[in-house]
Image (cartoon, rainbow, N blue to C red):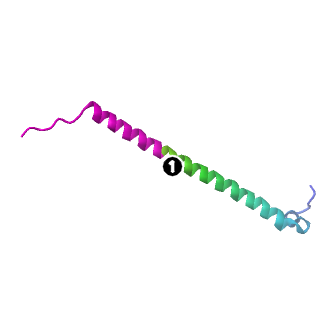
Amino acid sequence: MYFSSLSELIAMDGHGPFVWLAYGTAVVVVLANFAATRSATRRQENALRWRDQAAAMRQQQAENPEKPQEP
């Protein structure tokens, strides 16, 4: 291994803060993209579910229209 201790690995001959910041930024961006995609997918699934339920209700009402009650 190039580094003889954990502290040398973290320091990376003075370049450590830049390297670890880049790794951290990459991880944050990947996690944010994952969360945004998951959220958008759930919203779309809910919208489609609502649309299907509304269509089923309209279909049911068309098949069984309520008869007007006679006084």
Outermost residue, left direction?
Answer: 71
Q: Is residue 66 magenta?
A: yes
Q: Position of residue 3 (x, y in %)?
A: 91, 60
In the figure, residue 69 lies in which quadrant? top left
Residue linked to disc 1: 43
Residue displayed at 83% across by 65% down: 18
Disc tally is 1
Residue displayed at 93% across by 57% down: 2
Foreground residue, 28 or 12?
Answer: 28
Q: What amino acid is labelled 1 in the image?
A: Arg
Residue displayed at 25% across by 32% down: 64
Magenta-drawn segment: 46-71
Q: Is residue 49 magenta?
A: yes
Outermost residue, top direction?
Answer: 63
Foreground residue, 3 or 46?
Answer: 46
Q: Position of residue 67 (x, y in %)?
A: 17, 35
Q: Position of residue 52 (x, y in %)?
A: 41, 38
Q: Quadrant of the C terminus?
A: top left
Residue displayed at 92% across by 55% down: 1
Compared with 21, 56 (above or below) is: above
In the figure, residue 22 lies in which quadrant? bottom right
Q: Is residue 65 left or right of residue 4?
A: left
User: Element at badge 1?
Assistant: helix
Foreground residue, 70 or 20?
Answer: 70
Q: Is residue 39 left or right of residue 53?
A: right
Q: Position of residue 31 (x, y in %)?
A: 66, 55
Pointer 1: residues within 10 angstroms few (<14), some, or many (20+)? few
